[in-house]
Image: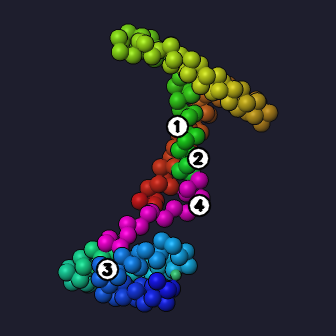
Amino acid sequence: MKCEDAEMLMMKYMDGEINEIEAESLNGHLLVCPKCRQAFEVYDSMLSGMSEMETAEAPEGFENAVMMKIRAIEKPEPVYSSRDKFKIRFGGSFAAVLFIGLMLMAYRDDIIGVLSLNQYTAGRVEGLKAFSEMIAMQAETFMMFFNNVIESVNAVLASGSLFIAGGIVALCAVQAFLARKKNR
Ligand SMILES: [Zn+2]
């Protein structure tokens, strides 16, 4: 399909007059042509902006028909800004890793104790022990680095480093959560 043909089908799509076969071939072109895909995304966001504004006035049948056609063509991925992507990816995983590290540091023996009692998990405890020691070691390395930073910035804060690390966990998690929620 040529780009001009795709353009024409996009107009039909905008008017809600595209049929299933046309939608499919348009979709096929959009998959291979970044230029048209970009144009389509602009049209599509215009269209969804309009249909949002018209929700109150538009007759129900019309609205449903348009929405069904939109869904037939593609399920748009939520559009994350690159800043939000960064927050979700790094904030989320950083919070998770740090949280696990802190939990293991604080409760490692308890966790291993509980798992040893269970017949099913007892056999895995050895592996877990090694794993948790590795994580705890990394967490300790991080805490050491963290302490150095804090000490160099402010000696008063050093005593509360675990608390502050917990605060950073919460902050990362909240940032990731907000970024995700905003784009839902
Ligand atoms: Zn094209």
Q: Nearer the viewer, mark 4 or mark 3?
A: 3
Inter-mark Cα distance, 2 to 3: 41 Å
Report which residue position mark 4 lands on.
82
| Residue 96: mark | 1
> In which quarter of the view is residue 35 placed?
bottom right
Please tell me whether mark 2 sits on a helix, a strand or a loop: helix
Label 4 crowd bin: few (<14), some (14–19), many (20+), radius 10 Å: few
Q: Are marks 2 and 3 in contact (CB under 8 Å)?
A: no
Q: Residue furthest front?
A: 1
Please tell me whether mark 3 sits on a helix, a strand or a loop: helix
Q: Are marks 1 and 3 in contact (CB under 8 Å)?
A: no
Residue at x 55% of width, y 49% of height: 89
| Residue 117: mark | none
**Closer to the camera, 14 or 26?**
26
Going from N to C along the chain, the mark reached first, 2 or 1, is 2
Going from N to C along the chain, the mark reached first, 2 or 3, is 3
Q: Which residues are magenta?
A: 71-86
Q: Is residue 123 left or right of residue 57?
A: right
Going from N to C along the chain, the mark reached first, 1 or 3, is 3
Disc 1 residue type?
Ala
